[in-house]
Every structure is written in C-alpha cells, then in structure tokens.
Image (cartoon, rainbow, N blue to C red):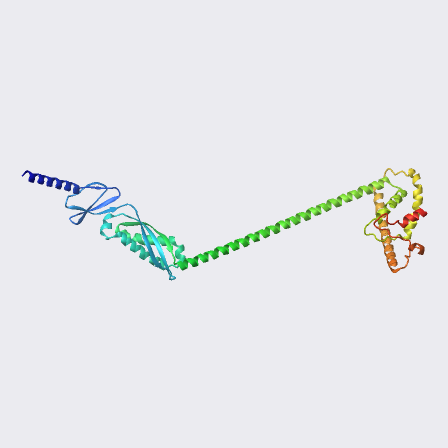
Amino acid sequence: MEAVVAVLVGAIALLAVITLVKAVRIVPQQRMDVVERLGKYKRTLSPGLNLLVPFIDAVRTKVDMREQVVSFPPQPVITSDNLVVSIDTVLYFKVVDPVRATYEISNFLQAIEQLTVTTLRNVIGSLDLERALTSREEINRHLSGVLDETTGRWGIKVTRVEIKAIEPPPSIRDSMEKQMRAERDRRAAILNAEGQKQSQILTAEGEKQAAVLRADGDRQARILQAEGQAKAIRTVFDAIHQANPSQKVLAYQYLQALPQIANGQANKVWIVPAELTKALEGLGGALGGLSQMAGDVPSAAVDAGAVEREAVEAAEAAAAEARRVTDEVRAAEAQVSSGTAPQGLPAAEAVPAAPVTGDSGAATPVAARRTEQA
C-alpha cells in the first residue's frame, strides 16, 4: 500500500513539474514566439518571462528578428546577346512581422531565393554582357525594389541585394583579356608617343633658346670688340696727331714696316714699283739726317677738326695709292708670267726683282739694295 502511495505521489510531482515547465516560457532578446491555442493563433510572446496555459497553448514557431544574410548559389543566366553567365547574389533581410512570416508563406527563405533568381533572370535577360558587367548598381536597385514590394506582404523587409560575382564563359573571358591587353598596349603606345613628342619639342625649344643666346652673346661680343677696336684706333690716331711727328719719323717707321709686309705666308712674289724705289731713294738722306732730328719738336696742341680732316685726306690718299700699287703689281705679275718686263721698271731691273717670301732672311728686298746704293 505504501508503495502505491509513493508511486502516486511521484506521478503527481512529475506532472506538476511538467505543468510548470509548460506554463513558463522565457523568450530571449531579438526573438518572437508565435503561440497557438488549440491550433489557432493566440498571441506572440515578447522577449522575457511569459506564462502559458499548460497543455492548451503551444509555441508554433520561433522567429529571429535580427537582420539575416543569405548567400544563394551561382545561377546560370542568359544575356540579351545569348551568352550564359553565372551570377552569385547575396541577400540581406529581416522579419518585421512574425505572424505574417509564419502564416502567409510556408518557407519564406526559399520563396525569397526563387524570387531573386527569377527577377535576376528578367533583368539580366534585357542587358548584353558588357552592360551587365558595368551596371551592377542598376541591377541591385531593381532587385531590391522588386523583392521589397513582393516580400512586404510576407512580413519581411529586404534591406539590401548585392551581386557578388558575374562569371562569363571561359572563352569569353579569354577574349575579354585579349581585348583589355590590346587596349592597354594601345594606351601605352599613345603615352609613349606623347612622351617622345613632348621630349622632342622640349629639346627643340632648348636648342632654339641656346642658339638664340649664343647668337646674342656673339653679337654682343662683336659689338664690344668693335667698340674696343674703334676706341683703340681713335686713341692711337689722337696720340699720333697730338704728337705731330715729322715726315722723317714716318719715313723711318715705313722702312721698319717693310720686312713685316714681306713676311706674310701667302706672299710668294712681291714686285716693287719704280715709283716706290724712287721714294726710297730719299730715305738715305732721311737716315743721314736722323742725327739732326733733335730740332723736331712736336706741337703742343692740335685742332681736332683739322686732325679729322687730315685723317680723312690721308685715308683717301692711302686708298688711292693702294689701288694704284695693286693695279701695278697685278700688271707686273701678268707681264712676268708672259715673259716680258714690266712697264714701270727698266729692262735691266726687271730680272733682278727678286721675290720677297715669308722668310725675312731668305731674300733681301730690292728697296734695301737701292738704299745702300744711294
């Protein structure tokens, strides 16, 4: 009897524990439990401690209210240019109404996947491959709009749809790589040509500027050199006229300049005219009268205008004399080459007219012998 009572008490205690467990329901945060009473929707349990009627109320589903991420497997899609591409999609959604998510559709996750695939095929089917590869943002917006509108009545909010990858066929990938490589090569060739063009332009500009600067420097140097020579000539000219040298000094200076005139490397033959020999005959007297040159005293002051006029006249006379001497020398050279004696010299003097070469010691000028005879 006592054993029966013990079993009965144990059964009552176990029933009480089971009843207590079924009557108390603790719901964690971010989860909603849908409760049915005798097979009919009764209420939704919120997070925390909730009490149920044992053996009458039952939890139908436990709905997670957090945002969820679902990655769908690659789906083959045909583009408008009849190319099959494989597209991976990622879906972000969350349940906003657990009752409708439980009773409006049997499996909302599978429904969302199929809806995504069909919508994606409709969108990609209206685009070619190139546009499909470059219009991901547009495809994402279109998918989000269609899915959000359809899943709204299921109590689900689609927050974001992303295309993870678009994989064209291997042959198309090879063609695309070749096209991209050719495009990069073309751009590299264009950039290289542009660089060479700019380099040549800059080099030409630099050479142009360098040539201009060199020409300007040469011009400035020539101008300065000419100015220096002009000042030197003017200084020598003024010094000579201020000193007022006598004719004897000038004759002596001319005699000293004769060997330098004959010392040129290009002077092969030098014919002395008869007039010049006559002029040199008086140099002996000039040399003999050098001892009486103590009385030649330069003038203290010289008129500048007179000096300039005298310089002009002397220059004109020297030019005329030079032209005359040049004409006589050319005529004498022509007669020597033809075997006749020059007209300006006697027949006896035509042969002894020895040439004056670049070496001052190789030949003695005729004018010197004339001076010794005098």
The quadrant in which the N terminus is found is top left
State which quadrant residue 79 falls in. Answer: bottom left
Give the x, y percent position of residue 208: 64, 50
Residue 219 placement (x, y as % from top left): 71, 47
Position of 85 with respect to 357 (left or right) is left
Residue 303 visible in this rendered orientation of the protein = no
Count every numbered label the image shows and give the total: 0
Q: Is residue 297 left or right of residue 71?
A: right
Residue at 94% across, 44% down: 285
Horizontally, residue 227 falls left or right of residue 91, namely: right
Residue 348: where, in percent of width, then height? 94, 55
Residue 75, relative to residue 37: is it above or below?
Answer: below
Residue at the far left in the pictured view = 1
Q: Residue at x 9, y 40 (%)?
A: 7
Nearer to us in this view, 110 or 316 = 110
Instruction: Work out whether 30 lies above or below 344.
Output: above
Q: Is residue 189 visible?
A: yes
Q: Where is residue 338 in the image (x, y as percent from the top left)?
A: 87, 60
Residue, far right: 374
Residue at x 59% of width, y 52% of height: 201
